[in-house]
């Protein structure tokens, strides 16, 4: 999808935001250090796994479906500014039944906002098969008056070309579009989910063998003589080296002092009184922003 985007396009997603954070400008170190809550993190350890941001990337949202109306809002700003851009608003099949999605699509169509509502359908949401959770599993049709398309989310080139077409549709002033990306999740939803109580191990292995997007793309470019096996191995080696170096920082860097809890609460105001756990703990902000604090501790 990133390959089809142009300068100024925006993205907003749920809490599987690590890849997008890197794609839109953060470094591997910033992503990994944010996961471990370190100062070197994308937002200096204050966001953690769910809340990372870069220019034109609006997170990382922990509440299921919360990004849907926010994405429409970003698109409204684009239309107001007369930008030829789109806001890619991603959500999972588990969030496709959220009421706020239908409110957002209604406003987006009413005002013809340049927003792509992208449903990443992994088939199981948190752990419930789509057939058990949705009366209609054709998520690309769920926009009603907002047209939609189905895309094989495991085919890298299909995703790029579909996104190009969808962006052109929105850029032409026709309003919002829905995209359903049919994909698959190899692992459980979280550490507490083994991922095998609602499907078989054989099913997972079959998808890995026949539909994996990375191995599938690798086979394509080797077959087309666009790269050799040796060249790809060299890239893999460099990537592993970069990740290993980033991991060293992510596991050794310091954390922000407690004063960081009181920063970034208000914008462009004098230092405010902030109440702690009790009224007796009320203090005046020692630093208004993280930038002020980082400068004070020599990490600016």
Image (tube, grey):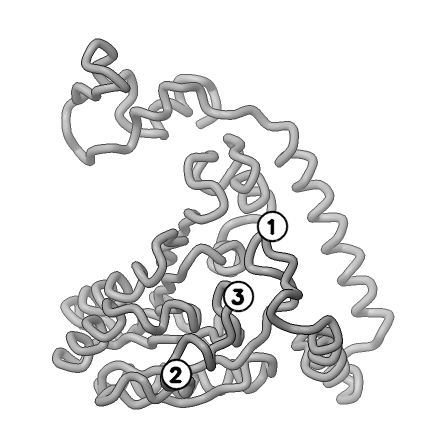
Residue at image mark 1? 191
Q: Is residue 219 visible?
A: yes
User: On the rendered image, what quadrant is the C terminus found in?
Assistant: top left
* Residue located beneath label 3 in the image: 127
Check the image and report above or below for 40 versus 147: above
The picture places residue 51, in percent across and down from the top left corner, at 41, 47
The residue that disc 2 covers is 139
Q: Element under label 1?
A: loop
Which of these two is toward me, 297 or 99? 99
Query: Are there few (<14), some (14-19), or many (20+) residues within 10 Å of tag 3?
Result: some
The tag earlier along the polypeptide, 3 or 1, is 3
The residue closer to the viewer here, 245 or 143, is: 143
Q: For residue 87, which quarter of the picture?
A: bottom left
Q: Nearer the viewer, mark 2 or mark 1?
A: 1
What crowding class fits label 1: few (fewer than 14 Cα within 10 Å), some (14-19), or many (20 or more)? few
Query: In the orientation shown, which residue stands out farthest toward the top?
Result: 280
| Circle 2 or circle 3, nearest the eye | 3
Q: Residues under labels 3 and 1: Cα distance?
A: 13 Å
- Give the CA separation, mark 2 to mark 3: 18 Å
Marks 2 and 1, Cα distance to the nearest angstrom? 27 Å
- Residue sitting at 31 percent across and 84 percent down? 142
Q: Position of residue 109 (x, y in %)?
A: 18, 81
- Verify CB contact (< 8 Å) between mark 2 and mark 1: no
Q: Name the foreground residue: 128 vs 7.
A: 128
Q: Is residue 246 above or below residue 68?
A: above
Mark sitting earlier along the chain (2/3): 3
């Amino acid at each position: 999808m990133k390959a089809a985007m142009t300068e100024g396009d925006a993205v907003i997603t749920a809490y599987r935001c690590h890849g997008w954070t890197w794609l839109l400008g953060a470094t591997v170190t910033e992503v990994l250090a944010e996961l471990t809550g370190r100062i070197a993190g994308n937002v200096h350890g204050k966001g953690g796994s769910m809340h990372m941001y870069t220019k034109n990337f609006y997170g990382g949202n922990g509440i299921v479906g919360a990004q849907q109306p926010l994405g429409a809002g970003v698109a409204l700003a684009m239309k107001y500014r007369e930008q030829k851009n789109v806001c890619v608003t991603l959500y999972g099949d588990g969030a496709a039944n959220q009421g706020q999605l239908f409110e957002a699509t209604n406003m987006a169509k009413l005002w013809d906002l340049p927003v792509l509502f992208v449903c990443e359908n992994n088939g199981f949401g948190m752990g419930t098969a789509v057939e058990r959770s949705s009366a209609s599993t054709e998520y690309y049709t769920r926009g009603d008056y907002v047209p939609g398309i189905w895309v094989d989310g495991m085919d890298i080139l299909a995703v790029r070309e579909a996104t190009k077409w969808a962006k052109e549709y929105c850029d032409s002033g026709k309003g919002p579009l829905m995209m359903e990306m049919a994909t698959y999740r190899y692992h459980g939803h979280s550490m507490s989910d083994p991922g095998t109580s609602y499907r078989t191990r054989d099913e997972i292995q079959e998808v890995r063998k026949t539909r994996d997007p990375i191995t599938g793309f690798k086979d394509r470019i080797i077959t087309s003589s666009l790269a050799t096996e040796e060249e790809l191995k060299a890239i893999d080696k460099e990537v592993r080296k970069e990740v290993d170096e980033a991991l060293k920082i992510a596991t050794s860097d310091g954390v922000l002092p407690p004063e960081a809890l009181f920063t970034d609460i208000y914008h462009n105001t004098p230092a405010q009184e902030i109440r702690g756990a009790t009224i007796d703990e009320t203090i005046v902000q020692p630093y208004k922003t993280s930038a002020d604090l980082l400068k004070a501790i020599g990490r600016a």
